[in-house]
Amino acid sequence: MKTLLYLFLLMLFLERQAPSADSPFVQESAEGPSAERLAELTRLSSRRTPIKLEDYLAKVAASNLSYASQRYNITIAETALAAAKLFQNPVLQFSNAKDQTHNRSQALAGYYQTSMSQTFEMGGKRTKRWLVARQNYAATSATLQSFLQNLRLDASAAYADAIALGKVASQFQRTAALLRDLLQAQQERQKAGDISDVDLLQTRVEVRQYEAELLNAQAQATNAELGLNAFLGPQFSSTHWYPVGTLDVTPQSTELFKLLSSAIRNRPDLVAMRHLRDAALANINLEKAKRVPDVTVGALWIQNTPSYNEVSPQPLYNAAGVMLSVPLPIWNRNKTGIAASQAMATQAQLQLDNAEVQAGVAVRQTLSLYDSARERVDLYQGGVLKDVDAALEKRVLSYKRGGSSLLELLDAQRKANEVWQSFYDAQSDHARAVIELHRAAGIWIIHF
């Protein structure tokens, strides 16, 4: 009896000491985070964080992985530049020879030879090779700047699209709110017998239609905001950014001469091509310097072993000497290398000339597109938006007084939505036109 009592008390004690099924530790280890924790993580990841364009572009430059990988090209170019200044390594040689014909007592004399030599590049090859590497390094640096500029402008375009789609969603939200108020008023009027059931049903259908369009517009705006993370590093993958700003973008200049001058002088891709052209020209001098033969000088030490051969005995002796080696440029004067380098320099110059022509064409085209986009925005801001809002307001008042039908009111509302959406599209096109104009002219600065 006592034994059973002790077992019962022991089981009760163990049951009270064991963690319950509701224990947070059990839930976290066996079933993962609790529902409350998952809700908290979801709330944090879906919370919209406002960000200005300048801050966004700074984060892009600091965290974009493609740009981070491109920066290693600078390290590679730096190592090539450092390697171009190095001297050739000296050569240490050791040799030994023994008589393999006679036996040990009659073996002829052998020798041990040790030498060290150093090749000296003549004709300034080392300096000319360093000049080529320096131009290649400058071209790599300019190419990296071009990558960063295009990355910033692409990110700016995505930022502008997010703002435009957000404004479209806001317009649909205002329309849906107006129609909800209208539906409520229609329900009261229908109860009072002022309108028929058909008008109420028509209003309800329009409200549902605009709510569906609102959901679509909000989805597109949210998708554009989430797309901003495509230009950022993985540390921002769970952040929902909210772009802060307007689409009233002004280009730094609209004068064709200034834009062309900026493009030719400042575009990093053209700067990189100029350095590549200069590297090709410097390579011609390097190839010409290769016609001068390099000189190899060295010192050697020889020890001849003694020989007790009866026919040709020889005592032990040591010898020291110097050596000089100069290849004779009789058959190869590096004419092919010089001709190839001259052809590459001419090719690099033609590619640069063509790129400058294309840059001028791009500036003129983007300036034309900007002028067209600016005229569209001015057209809407010059009175179209004000007129369409005034027409809608008057139509609402007329409908309330019984002077207009429901279809006329809904048509006016639909027309106002179309005009405002077209205006936001025009603003987005204008912002993109400014971005592309700056890209063509090699201008980095842009503000929303």
Image (spheres, helix red, strand yellow):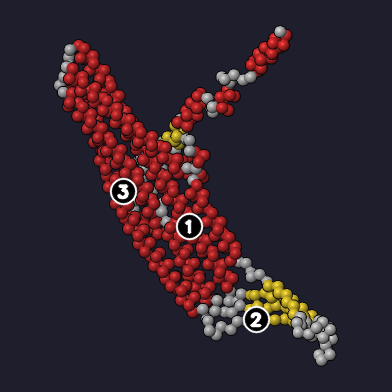
**Nearer the camera: disc 3 or disc 2:** 2
Residue shown at the point (51%, 51%) measured from the top left:
69
Residue shown at the point (59%, 71%) measured from the top left:
126
Circle 3: residue type = Tyr
Circle 1: residue type = Ala
Q: Position of residue 1 (x, y in %)?
A: 71, 8
Residue shown at the point (38%, 50%) measured from the top left:
438
Q: Which residue is mark 2?
A: 325
Q: Residues within 10 Å of mark 3 (few under 14, many from 20)?
A: many
Q: Which residue is mark 3?
A: 370
Q: Give the residue at the far top of this rendering.
A: 1
Q: Which of 112/444 is in front? A: 112
Disc with the residue nearer the chain's start (3 vs 1): 1
Q: Which of 338/37 is in front? A: 37
Q: Position of residue 170 (x, y in %)?
A: 33, 31
Residue 149 lies left or right of residue 23; in this view the side is left
